[in-house]
Amino acid sequence: MAAFDRRLFESLKPTVGEMEIVEFTGSEQGDKVHMKFIKPIQAEWVSEIIEHGETESDAWFVDVGVKLPWPLASWTHRHIVQKVDEHHSLILDDMTFTGKNALLTLLLYPAIFIGFYPRKKIYKTYFEQLAKH
């Protein structure tokens, strides 16, 4: 979980458009993430880490949207790392969200999927390189 830092967060930035990380204080309860989207839309996103924890088999932290871009009304994102064996882990992005109305919520599903799907490869590459050092 220590690797869920600003450097990883920078690596996860979308390749489409332009986004600035205004503030990233960490991945523990009470920390904050503040992003500013510049292109193709102008919007701000502020999330607060409301929970983090670790067991023998899992580690996680949860962020909740405090200030969200339109059309999002709510956002909860559980970042979960599950231990597979001594050398392998599985990273899960578990998101719950709503739009400003039911139709927007439905329309957000493909956009969120497309936005988060590239993380699979980014996580794999990032952690493979980290393991080499």
Image: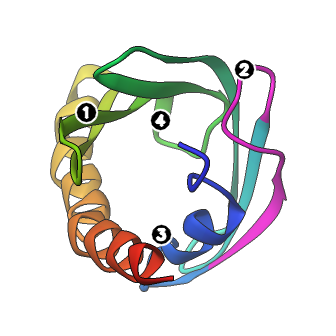
Observer-nearest of 42 and 80: 80
Nearer to us of marks 1 and 3 is 1
Residue labelled with disc 2: 29
Q: Secondary structure at mark 1?
A: strand
Residue nearest the viewer, comparing 41 with 56: 56
User: Cβ–Cβ below 8 Å for labels 4 and 1?
Assistant: no
> Closer to the N terminus: mark 3 or mark 2?
3
CB atoms at circles 3 and 4 under 8 Å apart?
no
Q: CA distance from mark 3 to mark 2?
A: 21 Å
Marks 2/1: CA distance? 19 Å
Q: How is the image coloured?
A: rainbow
Residue pointed to by mark 3 = 12
- Amino acid residing under circle 4: Leu
Q: Earlier in the sequence, mark 3 or mark 4?
A: 3
Viewer-nearest residue: 44 or 120? 120
Q: Measure the C-alpha gap from mark 3 to mark 4.
A: 20 Å
Q: Is residue 65 left or right of residue 24?
A: left
Question: In the rendering, which numbered label is found on residue 107?
Answer: none
Residue type (three-letter) at the residue carrying disc 1: Gln
Residue 74 position, x and y percent, is: 49, 22
**In the image, is 15 to the left or to the right of 119?**
right
- Marks 2 and 4, how far apart at CA: 23 Å
Contact, mark 2 vs mark 4 (Cβ under 8 Å) = no
Residue 122 drawn above or below residue 116: below
Residue located beneath label 4 in the image: 72
Amino acid type of the residue that numbered disc 2 sits on in the rendered structure: Gln
CB atoms of marks 3 and 2 within 8 Å: no
Q: Which residue is mark 1?
A: 82
* Disc on the earlier residue, 1 or 3: 3
Q: Which segment is the magenta one?
A: 19-31
Q: Residue at x 80, y 22 (%)?
A: 30
